[in-house]
């Protein structure tokens, strides 16, 4: 098993420190674990986005975060867990320069690129779902996937995180989604980025993996590599949903995953995990 997406208490909406995550990963049988804390929000977003203080690690903790992940590596290796230094970056247009500057400063193994915001609305925050009523859901999905493709093209990330997060609260267009899945898969394929199968969706109102199986099939047809992450926000969630992720990957025709070391993708056969 691998898990390339976990958060610690430092983002202020998760619990557990790096040592607790490593212990949980060792007992779950995880061989590769990437810490991917939320990159500190761009100053423009902290000012504009209601609730922003609870969405990401504060800027003055970035050095501490990097140091503690690098430091836990030796103890983790003794437990049979390879620890990777990662980060999850919001790549809405206004945040890209800020992210780029931070990403250049640290020796990250893997960078997840995410869209959690439409303008100044955190559409994945359970406290802010009333805003869905202000949108045509079809237009919202078009906008989300356009922003996601733009984020993928920035070149800042290695992996597109929770690629259909916009379905989280079950606001899904009535029209067939195949065209949107196909065009998004083609856009991501052009960038060379990977996509993660993110199991957190299983624990949310949408009650399915990110991405949906039909979307994962389009990604495979387009030649997009995949990795797997639990998006754990507590040590007990490390590795959660692995079996479901694996079944979906096999159903979509994938035979291998990728892991990232020093931002280089390395292929691992699914059968070896
Ligand atoms: Zn996220
Ligand atoms: Zn996350």
Image: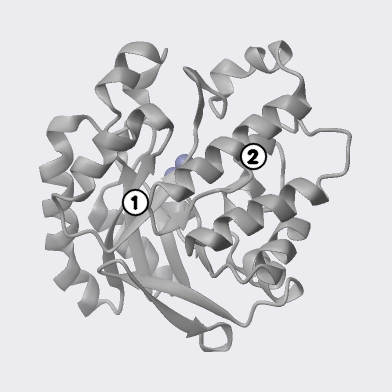
User: In the figure, 263 relative to 187: above or below?
Assistant: below
Q: Which mark is residue 36?
A: 1
Residue 89 lies, in percent from the top left, at 36, 42
Residue at (59% x, 48% y) in the render: 163
Q: From the viewer's perspective, is 64 left or right of 37?
A: left
Up/down of 28 relative to 60, above or below: below
| Residue in the image at 12% along x and 44% along y | 64
Question: Alpha-carbon neighbours of circle 2 within 10 Å: few (<14), some, or many (≥20)?
Answer: some
148 above or below 236? above
- Total numbered badges shown on the rendered structure: 2
How crowded pointer 1 is (Cα within 10 Å; few <14, some 14-19, many 20+) is rated as: many
Task: Name the disc covering residue 64, or none.
Answer: none
Q: Which residue is mark 2?
A: 204
Q: Secondary structure at mark 1?
A: strand
Find residue 93 and report its horizontal and vertical position in percent: 41, 31
Residue 1: image x %, image y %? 48, 74
Q: Please give the name of the residue rendered at 37% of the width and 52% of the height, measured from the top-left corner.
A: 155
Q: Earlier in the sequence, mark 2 or mark 1?
A: 1
């Amino acid at each position: 098993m691998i898990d390339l997406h976990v958060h610690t208490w430092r983002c202020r909406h998760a619990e557990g420190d790096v040592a607790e995550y490593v212990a949980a990963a060792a007992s779950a049988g995880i061989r590769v674990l990437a810490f991917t804390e939320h990159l500190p929000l761009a100053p423009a977003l902290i000012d504009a986005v209601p609730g922003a203080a609870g969405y990401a690690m504060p800027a003055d903790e970035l050095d501490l975060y990097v140091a503690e992940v690098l430091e836990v590596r030796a103890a983790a290796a003794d437990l049979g867990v390879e620890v990777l230094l990662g980060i999850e970056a919001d790549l809405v247009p206004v945040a890209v320069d800020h992210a780029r500057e931070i990403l250049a400063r640290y020796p990250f193994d893997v960078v997840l690129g995410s869209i959690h915001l439409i303008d100044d609305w955190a559409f994945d925050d359970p406290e802010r779902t009333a805003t869905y009523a202000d949108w045509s859901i079809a237009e919202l999905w078009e906008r989300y996937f356009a922003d996601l493709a733009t984020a993928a093209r920035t070149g800042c990330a290695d992996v597109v995180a929770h690629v259909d997060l916009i379905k989280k609260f079950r606001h899904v267009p009535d029209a067939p989604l195949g065209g949107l899945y196909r065009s998004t898969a083609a856009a991501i394929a052009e960038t060379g980025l990977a996509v993660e199968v993110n199991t957190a969706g299983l624990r949310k109102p949408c009650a399915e993996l990110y991405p949906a199986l039909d979307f994962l099939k389009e990604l495979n047809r387009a030649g997009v590599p995949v990795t797997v992450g639990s998006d754990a926000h507590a040590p007990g969630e490390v590795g959660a949903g692995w079996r479901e992720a694996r079944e979906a990957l096999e159903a979509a025709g994938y035979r291998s995953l990728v892991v990232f070391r020093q931002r280089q993708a390395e292929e691992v056969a699914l059968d070896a995990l």
